[in-house]
Image (cartoon, helix red, strand yellow):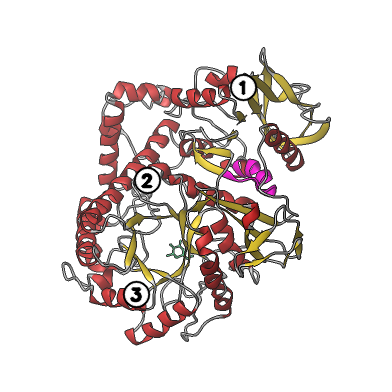
Amino acid sequence: MRLGAAWYPEHWPEEHWTEDVRLMREAGMNVSRIAEFAWSTMEPAEGQFNLDWLERAVSLLADNGIATVLGTPTAAPPAWLTQAHPTTLAVDEYGRRAQHGNRCHYCVNSPIYLDFCRQIVEAMAIRFGQNPHIIGWQLDNEYNRVCYCEECRREFQQFLKKRFDTIENLNQHWSTAYWSEAYNDWRQIPIPIGYHNPGLMLEWRRFITESYRRYQHQQIAILRRYIKPEVWITHNFMGWFDLFDHYEMAADLDLAAWDNYIGTGQLDYTANGAVHDLTRGLKRQNFWLMETQPGHVNWSSINNDLNHGAVRAMAWHAIGHGAEAVLYWQWRSALGGQEQYHGTLIGPDGKPRLLYQEIHQIGPDLSQAGDALSGTSPKAEVAMLHSYPDRWSVMWQKHHRDFDYIQHFIHYYRPLAERNIPVDVISDHASLDDYKLVIAPCLLILDDKLVESLTQFVKGGGHLILTLRTGMKDEYNALLPSRQPGPLSRLAGCRVEEYYALEKEVPLFSIWRDVERGNCSIWAERLEVGDEGHALASYAKSNGWLDNKAAVTMRDERAGRAYYVGTWLDETMQRSFMEFASDEAGVKPVMDSSKGVEVCRRVAEDGRTVYILINHSREPAQLDLPFSATNLFTQKALETPLDLEPNGVAVIAPAASDN
Ligand code: GAL
């Protein structure tokens, strides 16, 4: 397990470094990420590489037992480069070129830029490829820019040509007879600005994905020629950020990493866990938390601090969901630059800030629990399917102002998180072999492979929850020539007769257990129940169209089952439904706990198990442990019930006889 921070030695005279690194070591840190914005220091003029300082920084860290993750600096091209080659600067949708002086101001498709990237990455790879203190590389930093320049447009048109082969084919998939959009030459096709043809918009996102993938791949290919095979390559993604398809980007990386910031407010672990799980699902293995907030940020509407104890709790929350490392951004702020007010561990005076003490506690705890955690990862019986094309499609045509794919996703995740039921968040095209329950929120876009995978899952005894808007579209973002859920209708045991955006809440009642009454909002589908289907909930009197019609259905197939939820249930009904569906599927919580107490479990291949208990609430909590356990921080036996102070954490393992 690793604990560390982003450190920018290039911001400080070298005489400050020794004390910085000493304080890192004292805080129990054993990793530092450096250099990801240091291009102008590494190559102050074209072709003049100055990497000696960086090597000295790496050595100083190593002398203090701190390993290095080296960043390639391509998110911050230097001024000599952008001045000499203004076409390397990205162009926004209004035709304005990015200014120098912020970051990520590059055009990802500029051949000139790619060439400069190649040179700096190669210089670094030659110098550091065999350096024994570098355990991994981070490529660039939070890819996020879209460029609308002519070069990108030409590349996009080439991309479309490859994908559709003939312009007639493209016209047909995009229904371009509509509004006279038909194209007769690839060169006529624009980059979409604002709301546009949904088919064009989807391909544009696919093109952005391909562009970044090529950009990323160039750096990977260079590094792989020089670095040792055991050294990994990653990128720090941004959680739910959806500019490109992260499954495709992650396919070329050795491990997934992300940057977890709260911004305004406090951690909501019942939603935040989903983002850790999403990142874990990118490669279906443990991940790195490459950046997280030491107290507060500088970019939100209110840059409040996390409550006392919450930063430590958040670190263990990440580890509970599969983080192998937690790194704070950043160690110490430069005196100037855009992020002067951001939280840090060290003040401008070079001395620890208050939060340093809280983080200081994590290091020793991690080294105590490290052996037990090693080789373990979360194991889930429930999978939630996630898809970028579905998200994009919904986001562009919400149909209801409050229809948000992520909120809808969390609506299904939260009741599970509240009960300490672990979830894998995986691509909708991933294998479903190991699960008892699969939830496919808003599975808008269907293809044959996906239909087959879901059908086989249910036939094999799995329980599947399909939800509203499922099966409306094909992979080109065109409506399917069928009613929802299209090719899944038989499996689901229902067909959508009509869908309604709801101005007001609609009453409904359910019969999955005793009769319960509640409401739904935002979206309601009137379901026609199929031959072998049953209604589990129906709308009460509302707009006339929905009155007494089915809202939720269920259909059993062999040992398996499919639910179709055609509306957005209120919180209480949703909790009740999810409890019913997970119990029916035979899914078990990790442990019962009181509200606000999260219990995560990490399991090794040989069955060795570690539990991470976190009291996220502001009140003391008690937990009845279902087994006799050892406190891994102290290696002593634990008493039950276990007391957890507000933001308190315990990491425990069943005592040898119970393991
Ligand atoms: C991240 C970024 C860091 C830093 C941080 C501040 O998005 O990667 O470089 O800017 O935000 O919260």
Question: Relative to 598, does residue 315 appear above or below in the rendering?
Answer: below
In the picture, the disc for residue 492 is 1
Where does label 3 land, which residue?
Answer: 62
- What residue sits 34% from the left and 78% below the top? 63
- What residue sits 42% from the left and 42% below the top? 247
Q: Earlier in the sequence, mark 2 or mark 3?
A: 3
In the picture, the disc for residue 249 is 2
The residue type indicated by label 2 comes to Met
**Disc number lying in front (2 or 3):** 3
- Secondary structure of the residue carrying numbered label 1: helix
Estimate the x, y position of residue 335 in percent, counting from the top left: 43, 80
Q: What is the spatial separation of the Cα atoms under label 3 and label 1, in whole angstroms?
A: 58 Å
Q: Which stretch did the figure color magenta?
A: 409-423
Proximity of marks 2 and 1: CB atoms separated by less than 8 Å:
no
Q: Earlier in the sequence, mark 2 or mark 1?
A: 2
- Secondary structure of the residue carrying numbered label 3: helix
Q: Is residue 495 visible?
A: no
